[in-house]
Amino acid sequence: MGGSTGGVEILSRRLVRPESSSSPDRMPSEPEVIHLTPWDLALITVDHIQKGILLPNPRAGGAAQVIDDLASSFARALDRFYPLAGRLTASEVNDGVSNPSLVISLCCNNEGAEFVHAMAPGVTVSDITTSLYIPSVVWSFFPLNRLLSVEAAVDSLPVLAAQVTELEDGIFIAMSLNHGVADGTAFWRFFNTWSEINRSSGGSEAYELSTPLPVVDRWFLDTCPVPIPLPFRKLEDIVLRPEYTPVQECFFHFSGESVRKLKTKANAEMAGTATATMSSLQSLLAHVWRAVCRARQLAPHLEAVYRLAIGCRGRVEGIPQEYMGNAVTLGAARSTVGDVLDKGLGWAAWLLNRVGASFDEAQVRGDLASWAREPKLALVRPSRNPAYTVTGSSPRFDVYVRQRLRVGPAGGRPEWRREQAGREGDRVRGARRRRQHGAGGVPVP
């Protein structure tokens, strides 16, 4: 099945099912249902997680062999992450007493993940890596683009899709994962498993992977109802599609030396005052926060809010590092625009430092219990507050160490990584070019 989109020609689409390897008993013989947690369901109304890497020219043997090898290793990775070959389903709950409601679950029915082979005629590696603004054609490198996660239940779509796009002198490998079933940590664990299988002696089943098996069982509070009913009569009531404001995306790249200077400056400014050392990331984000406030010429009295994603693995008892579902909460640094600008880099970095330091497991558990009683879905919409900034992703994600794929003569090291920026407001993403070894690239509107 072919087609074209945004200047990119779709050469083929296929459904890839898990391919049993060394653990044939891992995947259930009959479809099983995984009920979604408050963390999962809260994100059912947001965009997919979308990330991709740019690689050099395919190795000898041509692109056709590369595509087949990638599809085969993708299937073996799915064997370890078999729920991602399933489908979201919805069922009505009507007990005749309370209002009708819906239950959305992940059915592990082995229908398969989507694998797309595409071509971008005339697009070169340098078109992407040297342009100040991200070329609009890059949007077409991602499957399931501009779809909300809940739409997978409406139209029985895959919850995971990969797209391999041939460029004139390179290859772009992108993946989209439904945010209602997993978070960024699970995304990169799958991607790295796929990569490791692909480069391991041609994907030999005897190869012992360094990536651990994911924990597919969901974690619930003991007091949480399972499944959790959502207060909607039908799925279509949940699909609230926003109007996306056209923006140009670009990346600012920071060298390692620049980041070290920011960290030194931030900690020097807070010497004798702060009770902890500000990290490189906190110092960089403080610099960005102040730059955004300054560039927008915001009134000093406005509340400046900076939201950060905080991982709960290792912070909440009962959630292992290998947990496959969503395990993320949001924290926020708040101040006035005037203070963010006037009190210095170190003070802004200190506010961001306190977001993580003030993590309270009891409060997180209380929020989860409250959510189950009164579900609140995340709405994808532009922020009405011009002083509102969000950082997504994480510098702890293993983005480059394991992402060597068998596509080039040097083992296929990524030259560039791309993330689809969030469209619910201004979002700062930690992306970077591998060769610069900086601490992050920052896309801005």
Image (tube, rainbow, N blue to C red):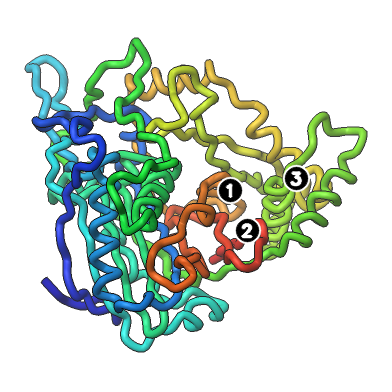
Which class describes the residues within 10 Å of circle 2: few (<14), some (14-19), or many (20+)? many
Q: Is residue 351 in sight in this rendering?
A: yes
Closer to the eye: label 3 or 2? 2
Image-based side of 192 in relation to 415, left or right? left
Mark 3 is on which residue type? Ala
Earlier-in-chain disc, 1 versus 3: 3
Circles 1, 3 touching at the beta carbon (< 8 Å): no
Residue nearer the viewer, 286 or 338: 286
Find numbered disc 2 in the image and state the secondary structure of the residue it sits on: strand
How crowded pointer 1 is (Cα within 10 Å; few <14, some 14-19, many 20+) is rated as: few
Which residue sits at x=57%, y=42%?
A: 308
* Residue placed under numbered mark 2 in the picture: 440
Residue 150 % position (x, y) = 24, 45
Residue 425, how many percent across, how many down? 48, 54
Vertical side of 162 occupied by 31: above or below: above
Which residue is drawn at the image coordinates 42% and 32% (left, top)?
322
Dot 3 or dot 2, earlier in sequence? 3
Q: Residue at coordinates 39% horizontally, 42% vertically from top-left?
A: 209
CB under 8 Å between callouts 2 and 1?
yes
Residue at point 57% right, 78% down? 132
Disc 3 marks which residue?
348
* Residue 424: image location, x then y, percent: 43, 53
Q: Earlier in the sequence, mark 2 or mark 1?
A: 1
Q: Secondary structure at mark 1?
A: loop
- Image x and y of residue 133, in percent: 53, 76
Which residue matches tag 1?
Answer: 395
Q: Amino acid at mark 1?
A: Pro
- State which quarter of the image contains the N terminus: bottom left
Residue 311 left/right relative to 96: right
Observer able to see residue 242: no
Residue 143 in which image quadrant: bottom left
Neighbours of disc 3 within 10 Å: few (<14), some (14-19), many (20+): many
